[in-house]
């Protein structure tokens, strides 16, 4: 959400769909302060994105920064860290993130590290080049001095499912050698993103508008279709990994296209009399967005193994929407409503993959430690009173891909910062949340960035 320049702010406004809001902030700090003033129910924290600072300085083209531009990007990361960011993040299968080379990421991660933050990565590959992506992430952590987190670790695509042993071995070897690296996951066999994850980066260069304009050119469409259909494409192609039957449409901006929500790409392509590749390109043009899609990619056996890893925590990788109003106009991934309850119901109570005590640790103390939050995540004097009361015998997720707008049950009482947020299973609608800021936040005693990451004491 920041830092933004005027062009980026204009894009924010132009790309809004059902939810309209004023972009009345420029920096990440201004955005966080604005949330706090408006009032928030949950706690909110943020990283600063390498893609955001890259777009601010370089735009969305496939270009490399010179020394001065890289210095400006470092300065923007430092500013965001001192405004409260927890670290620097990236999403390397998406443009313009994918244009960043490893050395650039090391430089920005090092800036985060000397500000007491971490490097958290949606890696360059989760499928065919997964092991190479793990190596890059470990390399960035070692060279930058910043702890690393792999967010929503997965092994995507049936032909890659056997790589989990090697993934675990690489991460545990790095941890044993002193590199601080952890991971999180969601508890479903499908991910959710856009059709951009099924198209080559070159056609998306310059941003959404240029991407759509290129897709109107028949010659470009022919080339894109051929690359999308290539099982050995040199870029991360989730469309190949999932296949047309494994891609489920979730979200459209254009009301005329919402008839396709809940249908697979195979079904929509057949109804429209097009190939799957032509269907995807047409839908991006007609909707004017990346289009929301669920990709069925993962093995349940691998999910169970990952759940049990001692350095694995959990993240829903989805916004916490409510089953009402504008939110009902699209179909989210069920993880938005069920990820954490599903862990407790399916993998603890039913399948006994891990104990209840370990699940609670992975949902509270472990992620707080990973994020270097020294006053949250434990029931302990002096800590913020973030307290959840649930019934292990009845906690249950209900959201499905067919009917995602269903709240989980079995969580009865919640306090956030000591304020009652849930009473007898019903939201109190109190402004119980706070902005949770990182260690370099200059609004706290001892804030600010240090000479190097070695000047900080990292949590175990």
Image (cartoon, rainbow, N blue to C red):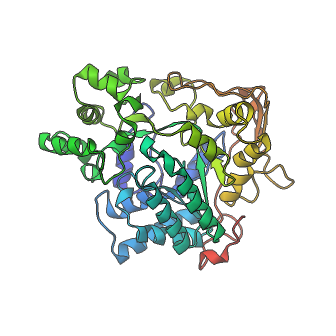
Position of residue 239 measured from the top left corner of the image (x, y, whole percent): 35, 40
Closer-to-camera residue (94/265): 265
When asked about the image quadrant of residue 114, the answer is bottom right
> On screen, 217 above or below 95?
above
Q: Is residue 359 left or right of residue 186?
A: right
The residue lying toward the viewer, choosing from 410 and 359, is: 359
- The furthest residue to the right: 381
The residue at 45%/24% (across/down) is 329
Q: Is residue 447 visible?
A: yes
Can residue 435 be seen?
A: no
Q: Position of residue 422 (x, y in %)?
A: 74, 31
Quarter placement of the C terminus: bottom right
The image quarter containing residue 173 is bottom right
Left or right of residue 295, residue 299 in this image: right
Residue at figure coordinates x 70%, y 26% from the top left: 409
384 or 140: nearer the viewer: 140
Quadrant hosting residue 277: top left
- Residue at image coords 45%, 27%: 330
Q: Nearer the viewer, residue 254 or 338?
A: 338
């Amino acid at each position: 959400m920041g830092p933004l320049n005027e062009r980026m702010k204009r894009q924010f406004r132009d790309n809004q769909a059902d939810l309209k809001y004023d972009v009345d902030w420029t920096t990440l700090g201004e955005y966080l302060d604005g949330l706090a003033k408006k009032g928030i129910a949950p706690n909110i924290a943020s990283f600063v994105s390498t893609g955001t600072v890259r777009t601010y300085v370089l735009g969305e083209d496939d270009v490399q920064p010179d020394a001065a531009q890289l210095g400006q990007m470092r300065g923007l990361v430092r500013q965001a860290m001192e405004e409260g960011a927890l670290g620097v993040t990236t999403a390397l299968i998406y443009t313009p993130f994918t244009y960043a080379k490893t050395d650039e990421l090391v430089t920005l991660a090092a800036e985060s590290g000397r500000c007491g933050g971490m490097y958290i990565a949606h890696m360059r590959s989760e499928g065919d080049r997964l092991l190479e992506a793990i190596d890059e992430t470990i390399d960035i952590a070692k060279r930058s001095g910043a702890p690393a987190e792999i967010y929503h670790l997965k092994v995507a695509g049936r032909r890659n499912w056997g790589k989990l042993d090697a993934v675990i071995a690489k991460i545990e070897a790095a941890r044993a050698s002193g590199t601080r690296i952890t991971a999180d996951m969601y508890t479903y066999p499908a991910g959710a993103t856009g059709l951009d994850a099924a198209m080559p980066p070159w056609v998306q260069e310059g941003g959404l508008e240029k991407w759509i304009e290129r897709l109107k050119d028949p010659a470009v469409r022919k080339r894109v279709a051929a690359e999308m259909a290539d099982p050995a494409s040199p870029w991360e192609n989730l469309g190949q990994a999932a296949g047309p039957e494994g891609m489920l449409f979730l979200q459209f901006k254009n009301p005329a296209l919402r008839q396709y929500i809940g249908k697979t790409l195979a079904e929509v392509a057949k109804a429209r009399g097009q190939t799957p590749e032509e269907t995807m390109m047409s839908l991006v043009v007609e909707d004017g967005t990346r289009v929301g899609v669920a990709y069925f990619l993962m093995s349940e056996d691998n999910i169970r193994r990952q759940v049990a890893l001692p350095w694995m925590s959990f993240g829903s990788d989805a916004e916490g929407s409510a089953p009402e109003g504008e939110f009902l106009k699209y179909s989210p991934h069920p993880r938005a409503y069920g990820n954490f309850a599903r862990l407790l119901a399916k993998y603890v109570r039913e399948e006994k993959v891990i104990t209840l005590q370990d699940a609670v640790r992975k949902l509270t103390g472990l992620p707080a430690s990973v994020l270097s939050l020294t006053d949250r995540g434990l029931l302990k004097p002096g800590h913020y009173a973030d307290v959840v009361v649930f019934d292990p015998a009845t906690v249950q997720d209900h959201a499905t891909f067919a009917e995602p707008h269903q709240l989980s049950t079995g969580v009865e009482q919640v306090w956030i910062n000591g304020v009652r947020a849930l009473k007898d299973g019903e939201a109190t609608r109190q402004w119980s949340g706070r902005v949770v800021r990182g260690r370099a936040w200059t609004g706290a005693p001892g804030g600010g960035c240090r000479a190097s990451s070695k000047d900080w004491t990292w949590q175990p």
